[in-house]
Image (cartoon, rainbow, N blue to C red):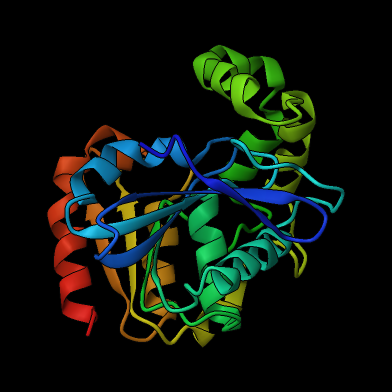
Amino acid sequence: MFESGKPVSVGDTNLFVSEAGNPKGQALVLLHGGLQSRLDFIPLAKLLAEDYRLIAIDTRGHGRSGIGTAPLTYRQIQNDFATVLTVLGLQNAGIIGHSDGGIVALRLAASRTVQPEFVIAVGAHWMLPENDPTRQIYQTITLENWRGMFGNQISVYNAENPEPDFGKLFKATTHMWLGCDEDAYPGASVRNIQCPLLVVHGDDDMLVSRQQAFELAGQVKGARLLNLPFARHTLLEDMPERVLPFLQDFMARVTT
């Protein structure tokens, strides 16, 4: 799943876009987390494939996408995805975004550069205050730490990226995580979101606090919150069968 695909130009590089599932089903765009790839959605995608047309995009520098020359920021990724969705005629597709993918999905919906039918943001920060403990994690994590935790994932990246340089990608991504300007987290702009929003949070998420998730849901009119006990940041990979009924119910209720 998600092995084949095609490059889509976003100016200074190409993003790899892969499709799976039911080509006649409702379009659902999948946006992965930082230092990951479209492949991390496979556990959930297998459960959605019968009913949905699934479009998974590798963020610039990740998976099979080139890193380009522009600085890696959430705004840049937002612009990249807006271009891809426009080229593919998917400006109104529903979006499931995990972690960084969820942050960018919030930015896309808030900016209204595209008009997603709905957004499901999983384990996503909407802001990251200076005193948030997650900043300490981002400031102290090293490339060696990451290799020790996710060595297999890095091996896949090295095998499929057109110009693999994980050290460069790691440095650019951690710098993005620590950003605090208008190119970083969406912040108060999430109040501009008009499409249906489901905020999904794992109660054992070590990166995104329960308060973050509750506050995000409170910022957006009509937003729904799913807080899953004993679930980690990687809940879509760890327990897709448990999450699926809630996602299906949300999507059925908000789609026309």
On the question of residue 159 being in view, the answer is: yes
Q: State whether residue 121 is above or below residue 237.
A: below
The residue lying toward the viewer, choosing from 118 and 8, is 8
Q: Position of residue 79 (x, y in %)?
A: 69, 67
Q: Residue furthest right?
A: 69
Q: Position of residue 53 (x, y in %)?
A: 31, 59
Q: Quadrant of the N terminus?
A: top left
Q: Is residue 100 left or right of residue 3?
A: right
Q: In this view, does 142 lie to the left or right of 213?
A: right
On the question of residue 233 being in view, the answer is: no
Q: In which quarter of the image is residue 77?
A: bottom right
Q: Which residue is drawn at 41% across and 39% down?
A: 2
The residue lying toward the viewer, choosing from 47 and 123, is 47
Q: Residue at x 61, y 81 (%)?
A: 113
Q: Is residue 75 left or right of residue 47?
A: right
Report how many numbered discs are placed on residues in the image: 0
Q: Residue at x 61, y 70 (%)?
A: 82
Q: State whether residue 112 is above or below residue 54.
A: below
Q: Residue at x 47, y 72 (%)?
A: 90
The residue lying toward the viewer, choosing from 222 and 251, is 251
Q: Where is residue 246 in the image (x, y as percent from the top left)?
A: 16, 59
Q: In which quarter of the image is residue 117?
A: bottom left
